[in-house]
Image (cartoon, grey):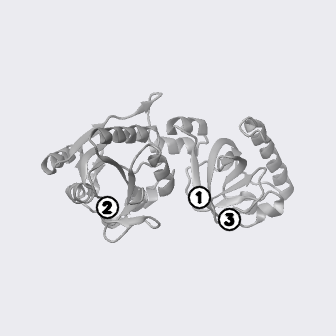
Amino acid sequence: MEKVVSLNINSKCLRDFECVYELYGHWAITVGVFDGVHLGHRYLIERLVENAKKRNLKSCVLSFYPHPSKTLSPSQQPCELTDPLERAERILRLGVDVVVYIHFDKEFSKVKAEDFLRNIIYERLKCKYLLVGYDWRFGYKKEGEVELAKEFGQRLGFEVETAEPFYKNGHLISSTYIRRLLHSGRLEEAFEYLGERYFIRRKVVRGSGRGSVLGYPTANLGGTENLCLKEGVYAVKVEDQYLGVANYGYRPTFDGRTKVLEVHLLDFRGNLRGKKIKVEFLSFIREERKFPSKEELLKQIEKDILTVKDSFRKEFLRF
């Protein structure tokens, strides 16, 4: 079995993942969206891995995609910190045996709490130990809560434990709080609560070619229109080795209508189109703005590159 799979619910699985009906063996499980996999998530997952080993169980993180809010309240859906693969990459680094995704659609949202525990957690995921947050709610209209899970666990034969909330610097760490920090360009604070610099890993797609015409070719990353980033210019690290300057936003100088992430790699020659690349955000440089002419834009790009080189010269000795 792959380390990242999608559970077949009503003949629906997440695209690009192995589609499975059930797990085999005995499992320790935690459940949640885990968008961003911040320090609070890590605390829960590391505790899961530790307790699974004590009980001679394999560890499983059960997550959902898309974010439940996209299905339940489309107008209130949050921006996206991680896509499924980025999320799984972070989770697996913590020692988890398998990440299981459920496609969260309207049909799945109507599954009752009791059915979720019995049919999915117990029968299909073979749960023997369930670890959840202290305020966990689940099932149709969030009717299920921890006490119900403990009652079902006693009846069916699996143990249920809760983890206390995780605080740092007096803040209850949450994906919502980290989204707010990133939206404000407060990257350093977001990094502190994520436990690492924020990064994405996305596919390079065909762009307008305007960067090459201007003399600063860019890698345009697909699926970035809903990132939790302030619109503007960033210093970035690409593939753990190249320094870069990235712009996230609408490209107002050229009247763009869709947000996109464009990355200019310094000291790089080659074609990245079609490849998935890791882009790690180092610092917010400035806000996006509209320039009166192409010449003014080029002057600003040159200033941005110098700013990035000066700020991160020590990390990238080639400059």
Q: Residue at x 76, y 66 (%)?
A: 209
Residue positioned most to the bottom: 11
Q: Which residue is mark 3?
A: 273
Circle 2/circle 1 CB separation < 8 Å: no
Choose between 86 and 115: the one closer to the eye.
Answer: 86
Q: How many marks do you count on the picture?
A: 3
Q: Nearer the viewer, mark 2 or mark 1?
A: 1
Rendering coords of residue 266 (x, y %): 77, 50
Q: Secondary structure at mark 1?
A: strand
Q: Which residue is mark 1?
A: 202
- Badge 1 or badge 3: first in the primary sequence: 1
Q: Residue at x 49, y 47 (%)?
A: 90
Q: Which residue is mark 2?
A: 109
Tell me how far mark 1 sits from mark 3, CA to CA: 11 Å
Rendering coords of residue 137 (x, y %): 29, 48
Residue 135 shows up from this direction = no
Identify which amino acid the numbered label 1 is placed on.
Arg
Choose between 213 and 93: the one closer to the eye.
Answer: 93
Depicted 12 relative to depicted 61: above or below: below
